[in-house]
Amino acid sequence: MKSALKLELAEARVMSLAALAKAKEIGVTETVCITDEGGFPLVLERMDGARVTGPQIAWNKAFTAAGHKRSTHLFNTAPNGPALPGNEAFGIQWSFEGKFAVFVGGYPIVVNGEVIGGVGLSGGNGEQDTACGVAALQALKDHLGAAADVLVQADIKK
């Protein structure tokens, strides 16, 4: 039997607050979704003025990152992005009734080498969504301190 870390609401809230603070700092209205390892939301927040489509898009990104254990933009990164035309996973974005996101803004939450959830952002351009996602991961790392090894980067593939 294997013991597993579980992302809890308190940690998800720390991550969400950090992502939203970063969004405010850089002047973009974002929606953030933090999911558990199965891609189910623990926290879903939309800033005042953010697009009404943001919650579903942010959830899709977090769901994909958690479930497939990779940053969502890596699916379409040339030349070997698996979802690019002619590559092995072309069309994967139509999986899970269109819930599978293959563009920038979704990041797996990796603690001690294991994917324990996902973070998804919607509302900014790719650079802005990335900044907010990395801020969320950094906040978790800071919150957990030396007790855990949290991967903080944009390009994650487990």
Image (cartoon, grey):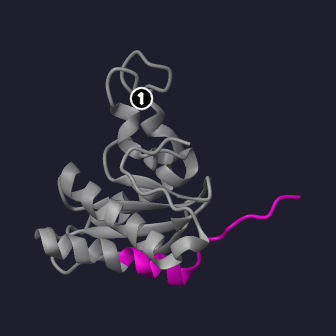
Q: Quadrant of residue 155?
A: top left
Rendered residue at 51%/75% (across/down): 145
Residue in view at x 68 percent, y 67 percent: 5
Q: In which quarter of the image is residue 57?
A: bottom left
Q: In which quarter of the image is the C terminus?
A: top right
The residue type indicated by label 1 comes to: Ala
Secondary structure of the residue carrying numbered label 1: loop
Q: Nearer the viewer, residue 152 or 38?
A: 152
- Furthest toward the front, the residue is 146
Q: Position of residue 73 (x, y in %)?
A: 35, 41
- Residue placed most toward the observer, 45 or 3: 3
Q: Quadrant of the N terminus?
A: bottom right
Q: Given the current orientation, which residue lies at the most extreme top position?
A: 86
Q: Alpha-carbon neighbours of circle 1 within 10 Å: few (<14), some, or many (≥20)?
A: many
Assess whether residue 7 is covered by the magenta stretch.
yes
List x then y, in percent, for residue 50.
19, 71
Q: Is residue 120 above or below residue 22?
A: above
User: Is 152 a magenta residue?
Assistant: no
Asked whether, in this view, residue 32 is left or right of residue 107, the answer is: left
Residue at 56%, 62% (x, y): give it: 149
Query: Residue at image x 34%, y 20%?
Result: 79
Query: Percent from the top left, x then y, of residue 60?
Result: 42, 55
Residue 103 falls left or right of residue 140: left
**Taking 87 as reference, is 92 above or below it?**
below
Give the extent of the magenta segment: 1-16
Figure label count: 1
Residue at numbered disc 1:
83
Name the outermost residue toward the left.
27
User: Whole-percent x and y of residue 153?
Assistant: 38, 52
